[in-house]
Amino acid sequence: MNRDGSILRLLQLASPALPVGAYSYSEGLEELAERQLLTSKTDLERWIIQELTYGSISLEAATMVRCYYAADTQDWERLKYWNAWLTAARETEELRSQSLQMGQSLLRLFRDMELGREDSLPHSQTQLLTELKQGGCNFAVIYSLAAANWQINLRDALLGYLQSWATNLINAGIKLIPIGQTAGQLMLFELQPTLEQAAQKIRNLEDDDLNSCGWGLALASMAHETQYSRLFRS
């Protein structure tokens, strides 16, 4: 695939319009807004920067990087290992369910888009997709497989993954706090250096460095499950 084709596939893969249900999750923001812990653009921006620096999004993205390398070399056992690892690393049932639901949705979409090229896929990859469909697939894992298949540069794929995540949280904040659409776009623009720094750090992480100390996310996610009134999925 040429460079233009890869860029177009990345824009599609990282688009908020991708029909995987990301818009229906707030990743704890709804609980934080309910408790008046997030009341402004500044609060939300600080939360996103905190998560990018210390939180579990770095684990997701680091797993995506490892699965990209595994897909690029067709090391399917390694890819399945990191899929299982990420499932086990999720801190709450809500976060695990989100990752697996979005993963299964993207897996079905990926298969549909590749249907006309099914014969060109290695048999081992076709078998892998079947196993992931049956056993559960995290979003970061199938994202990496699609990116590798479509010859999207890893650095671009990682930046797209992080920006897509940040965009989803900003859109949730626009509804919950609320803040305006213009404020949301300004925040995304201002987050660019943080996203670039996070991507560089994540690419350099060793396996023994994979950790997360964003415990506020886990507490907010657990509380969201029993929140009386919710706009977002639990």
Image (spheres, rainbow, N blue to C red):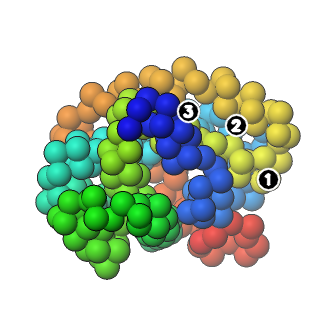
Question: Where is mark 1, residue-wise?
Answer: 175
Label 3 neighbourhood size at 10 Å, few (<14), some (14-19), many (20+)? some
- x and y percentages locating residue 18 in the rendered image: 59, 55
Amino acid type indicated by mark 1: Lys
Assess disc 2: are there few (<14), some (14-19) or many (≥20) residues with their C-alpha within 10 Å of its C-alpha.
few
Does the image show residue 63? no
User: Is residue 175 visible in this depiction of the protein?
Assistant: yes
Tell me where residue 210 appears, x and y as whole percent. 27, 42
**Disc 1/disc 3 C-alpha distance (Å):** 19 Å
Residue at image mark 3? 49
Look at discs 2 and 1 and give the one toward the viewer.
1
Q: CA distance from mark 3 to mark 2?
A: 10 Å
Query: Could you tell me the amino acid type at mark 3?
Result: Ile
Going by the image, does 75 lie left or right of 126? left
Of the two numbered discs 2 and 1 on the same chain, state the one appearing first in sequence: 2
Residue at the image point whose x is 56% and y is 63% from the top: 20
38 above or below 190?
below
Q: Are marks 1 and 3 in contact (CB under 8 Å)?
A: no
- The answer to whether the residue labelled 2 contacts the one labelled 1, judged by CB atoms less than 8 Å apart, is no
Question: Where residue 233 is drawn, which disc sits there?
Answer: none
Is 162 on the left-hand or right-hand side of 23? left
| Residue type, numbered disc 2 | Asp
At label 1, counting other C-alpha atoms closer than 10 Å, the crowd grade (few under 14, some 14-19, many 20 or more) is few
Q: Residue at x 64, y 49 (%)?
A: 16
Residue bearing the label numbered 2: 43
Q: Position of residue 141 (x, y in %)?
A: 34, 55
- Mark 3 / mark 2, whichever is N-terminal: 2
